Image (cartoon, helix red, strand yellow):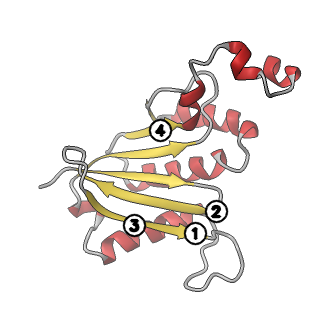
């Protein structure tokens, strides 16, 4: 069976997904559920990110890529804000989720839906490692003056 990784980007109003072969980089499947929680969706109303994740799983199955048939070895999650201590790819556990919740005020539109996507995926695929990858990793090694130049000094001191 071919190995694959499910990659999820549970954003503020969409869930993007891809299934890739980690050895070759070949794309096996991909898609998007968008306009989550917005009125007037043309195809199917999706109330929240938990429901959107189920649509992702159902879409994969409808395309002949059931979760049990994909040979999944891991699930990757894009997370916008990992704060000062979450900057490397991190195996998600309950402590990671708790820390992401603490950081949600720094990315209130992005971290809560990412957390919800992670929780739903962990419940659906509990035997797989779930790895969070953080946008803020890009800024981790900036010198302090460069990292805080554009923000209020009080914010910089508190976070």
Q: Which residue is mark 1?
A: 34
| Residue at 66% in and 38% down | 101
Q: Dividing the picture into quarters, in which one does residue 97 lie?
A: top right
Going from N to C along the chain, the mark reached first, 2 or 3, is 2
Going from N to C along the chain, the mark reached first, 3 or 1, is 1
Going from N to C along the chain, the mark reached first, 4 or 2, is 2
- The CA distance from mark 1 to mark 2 is 6 Å
Going from N to C along the chain, the mark reached first, 1 or 2, is 2
Question: Dot 3, how many residues are within 10 Å of its Cα: few (below 14), some (14-19), or many (20+)?
Answer: some
Residue 155's label in the rendered image is: none
Residue 13's label in the rendered image is: 2
Label 2: element kind: loop
User: Which is in the foreground here, disc 2 or disc 3?
Assistant: 2
Contact, mark 3 vs mark 4 (Cβ under 8 Å) = no
Q: Nearer the viewer, residue 1 or 35?
A: 35
Q: Which residue is mark 3?
A: 57
Q: Dividing the picture into quarters, in which one does residue 154 lie?
A: top right
């Amino acid at each position: 069976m071919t190995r694959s990784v499910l990659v999820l980007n549970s954003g503020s109003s969409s869930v993007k997904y891809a299934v890739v072969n980690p050895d070759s980089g070949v794309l096996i499947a991909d898609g998007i559920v968008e306009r989550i929680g917005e009125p007037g969706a043309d195809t199917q109303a999706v109330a929240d990110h938990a429901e959107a994740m189920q649509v992702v799983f159902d879409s994969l199955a409808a395309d002949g890529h059931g979760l049990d048939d994909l040979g999944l070895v891991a699930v990757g999650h894009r997370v916008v804000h990992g704060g000062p201590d979450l900057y490397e790819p991190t195996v998600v556990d309950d402590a990671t989720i708790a820390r992401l919740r603490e950081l949600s005020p720094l990315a209130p539109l992005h971290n809560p839906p990412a957390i919800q996507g992670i929780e739903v995926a962990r419940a659906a695929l509990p035997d797989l490692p779930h790895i969070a990858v953080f946008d803020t990793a890009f800024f981790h090694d900036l010198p302090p003056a460069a990292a805080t130049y554009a923000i209020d000094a009080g914010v910089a001191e508190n976070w």
